[in-house]
Image: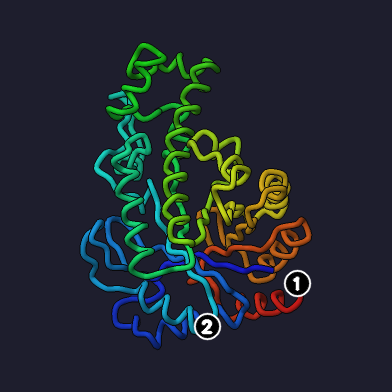
Amino acid sequence: MRMAVWGHPARELPAGADSTAHVRELLGKLREAGVTLYFPFVIGRGSTVFQSETLGATDRDLLGPILEVAGELGMQVHPIVGLGGLIGSGTHVYQKPYDNTEVPGWAKGWPCPSWGENHEIAVRAADELIVRYKPAGIHLDYVRYPNSSLLVTNPCACERCQQMRLKWLGKAVPEPRDLAIPGVTFKELQWRGEFVRSFVESMRGVTDSHGVQLSAAVRARYYEDALTEGQDWAEWCGDGLLDIVAPMSYNPCFGRFARFIGHHRRLAGETDAVWLAGIGRSSSMGVIDAETMGRQIEFAMDAGADGVCIFHAAALGEADLKALRQLSEKL
């Protein structure tokens, strides 16, 4: 069983407790529990924990020590690079389509994937990161448009998205009644998918050129969220764009978790991509205990997953690490 975790180095290694010894303590506990792959968020809200000329200066470099210690422990590290959300970079962001609509604060600064200029920043940063730090791979997250819960009623109306609609809809911003027409929805999803896929293809080109892997965290609800947001990860896996895919199948409800696993087995299980089932120890979906985490891991492995990826490292206490250690020896 391959075991991975998502981590937040800036949170796990706060200033004053971020020496190489602290890094060794953090990663050492994970390695003893059977974790061999660490996906760290190295970009967040405009700040970085690695040196980057593309993204600007950093207050401290945590990625260097992490990679040094991981190498000593026999762990692989895939730093996370994104296109949108909290970790994306770019000056062209989501714009609401209607003046009388209020949208969430997080959406207002979401870099829009329709802009090649936004792609370029992330691709250059990833290339620079690989050259400077030589990680085993790059991990993609937030590789999509904003959440489907927003898009279905408020599609992006930035300049580039308006230009796209003028070509096929004849208007820059769809009227609410247009969004109820299946053909309009199809065209919206089609070009969203093309823009996001082009970014993934570019990142695949970067990782291939350096001989490292490309992995990705993807939306658990494929039809409801992933496709609506331009993230056709099943197609990416089938076409060989991803080496590792980790659908974020977090849910405290075991029945819903099991339903996710069944869908993901069908979508990713028959491709060449390594399928890591996402386990939400503590996420926006809720919190589970060590026992439930263990049951979910065993269920995913019995269902045919190649391994699991746990969210997130800081949520793993002694009981969790003990459970993981026992499972890594058993499975």
Amino acid type, residue under disc 1 in the picture: Leu
Relative to residue 163, is residue 313 drawn left or right? right
User: In terms of secondary structure, where does tag 2 sit?
Assistant: helix
Is residue 177 visible from the viewing direction of this image?
yes
- Residue at the far right: name it: 302
Q: Which mark is residue 287?
A: none
Image point 31% across, 68% down: which residue? 50
Reading the image, the residue beneath label 2 is 73
Q: Nearer the viewer, residue 234 or 290?
A: 234
Which class describes the residues within 10 Å of circle 1: few (<14), some (14-19), or many (20+)? few
Q: Nearer the viewer, mark 1 or mark 2?
A: 2
- Residue at the far bottom: name it: 21
Q: Position of residue 298 (x, y in %)?
A: 74, 65
Q: Nearer the viewer, residue 98 or 120?
A: 120
Reading the image, the residue beneath label 1 is 331
Image point 64% across, 56% down: which residue? 275
Q: Which quarter of the rendering shows the N terminus?
A: bottom right
Q: Splitting the image into 4 quarters, where does residue 178 fall?
A: top left
Q: Which quarter of the rendering shows the C terminus?
A: bottom right
Relative to residue 270, is residue 73 drawn left or right? left
Relative to residue 278, is residue 187 drawn left or right? left
- Indicate how the structure is coloured in the image: rainbow
Asked if labels 2 and 1 touch by Cβ distance under 8 angstroms, the answer is no
Q: Position of residue 137 (x, y in %)?
A: 48, 63
Amino acid type, residue under disc 2 in the picture: Leu
Q: Which label's residue is closer to the chain start, 1 or 2?
A: 2
